[in-house]
Amino acid sequence: MGYDKAFTFQFPVTAIEEESLEASTAVPLTEINLPGSIITLTLNGRRFVPREWDIRDAVSVSGIEGVTFARYDAVDRVSDTVATVRLWFDGTDFDTDATLTLTVGADAISYNKDFTFQFPVTAIQNSNATVSISPASIVSPNVGEQLTFDLNIAGGENVAGYQATVSYSYTALDYVQSVNGDYLPEDAFFFSRGTKLAASTLAGAANGDGTLATLTFEGVDFKPSTLALSEVYLVDADGKRWEVTTVGAEVTIPPEPAEAIFGDINRDGIVNIQDLAIVAVRLDDNLETFGGRLKQNSADLNGDGLINIVDLVLVASAFNEVAAAPPLNPQTSGLLTAAKVQGWFSQAQQLTRTDPAYLRGMTVLAQLLKTLTPKQSALLPNYPNPFNPETWIPYHLSDDADVHISIYDIRGVLVRRLDFGHQIAGYYTDRTKAAYWDGKNAFGEPVASGIYFYTLSTESTRDSVTAGDFSATRKMLIRK
């Protein structure tokens, strides 16, 4: 083109990064943290295949018995270059340190070779100690009754801490609380999340036998069950963890007597409110079949395969003659409220049964309803008193009513109004039913120390000329 100059051009060219795969864990692996541990896979120069399912099929673990991963939710494809693998471990014991091998197949990254990684896993050694639950065997509590178990240690050496999990049947027992035992020093830090327990101390290690913790449960049904220990480890003064021998406990029921008493579900030789409470817990249960035959249930008194209002009335009909005015203990009074019994009575009235047993049961329910209904409304002393910062205000209602409690300071200025809406006649005395005040005013601010007054006011919702409104006032003291 008649030009005497050459032109030169330069183009940057990005080199292909060498393909590599890295595998890492957030913390070193041990026999303790194997379950749920996550291995992070990071790719360089390649991408993981798009589907997590294909990655799952290409990944495997070996080297330690009992270690694997769930095939359906263990792999997470975080990005094109990052994926995570969650381990699963069945708890198979190993006493010496081991090596876990992770293999990532070529199909996970559309590559022509596999990657293999090895992770050292520290084993937990066995100690000579035994951790057990006592009593080893105990008869099931009645519904609403509490029982306690001790978590004991025998043969402990240089123990500065522990962890343990107590498993139990939620259909038989309800967990209430756990408190630290006397084995570790008084200043030991104690942690409880439900029945998962842990404690540690810096004040010196303990040796020998003792109680690690005490657990309290409440019966929710009268049935056999098992308390088992898992994830139990001791920690010595050097921070090293040790495995122990564990022994659980059994909750039993008495054997069926040679001459069974109709309606005696808890097999104590008496038909009373405790038996009624068991049927109430099982109301509307459909009985399961076993081998084509209907499984027996002591609460199914008429044998129709259902536990319903008829069975409840039949239990009431079998009350001893001395139960003309059925007595209530603290546990059953908390379970059987006037509202519940009124509901049963109304439901039972809808059936057109006229047999003597059923009619007698109706009479007993009516007597029980009368027992559960106060003769007059009352405002009771709050507890605790003095208090800081919270308190409970108990009361009785002789009639169904709309209820509210007003709290005033010493000058008569309204501090807080607690509205409870419509409530059924009955006893509102324990902490699950009494009015609760957290010591704060209407703006959520803690009130000052001093004397306060609380007034219970009710507006009767009953259509009767004899049902009137009620109001009463008492004094309480906040001491900070």
Image (tube, rainbow, N blue to C red):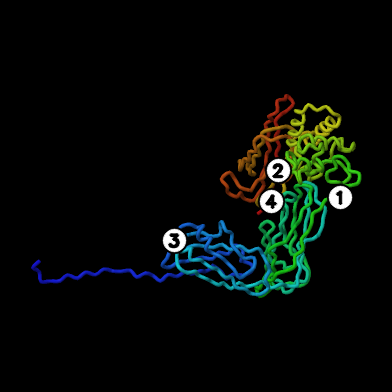
User: Which residue in the structure is indicated by mark 2?
Assistant: 434
Residue type at the position of mark 1: Pro
Tell me, for residue 255, which label it has, or none: 1
At a point 72% along the width and 66% down the height, the residue shown is 186
Q: Counting residues from the N terminus, which is met first, the one under dot 1 or under dot 4?
A: 1
Q: Which residue is mark 3?
A: 80
The answer for how far apart the CA atoms under marks 1 and 2 are is 39 Å
Q: Are marks 3 and 1 in contact (CB under 8 Å)?
A: no
Precedes in sequence: disc 3 or disc 1: 3
Left or right: where does residue 410 sit relative to residue 290?
left
Which is more toward the observer, 194 or 352? 352
Q: Amino acid at mark 4?
A: Phe
Looking at the rendered structure, the secondary structure element under dot 3 is loop
Residue name at image x 61 percent, y 42 percent: 416
The picture places residue 379, in percent across and down from the top left corner, at 73, 39
Instruction: Tell which tag, 3 or 1, sits nearer the viewer.
Output: 3
Q: Give the labeled residue for mark 4.
A: 387
- Spatial separation of the CA atoms under disc 4 and disc 3: 60 Å
Q: Tell which tag, 1 or 4, sits nearer the viewer.
A: 1
Q: Are marks 2 and 3 in contact (CB under 8 Å)?
A: no
Q: Is residue 273 above or below residue 198?
A: above
- In primary-sequence order, the first of circles 1 and 2 is 1
Q: Secondary structure at mark 4?
A: loop
Locate the C terminus by quadrant.
bottom right
Instruction: Give the amino acid at mark 2.
Output: Ala
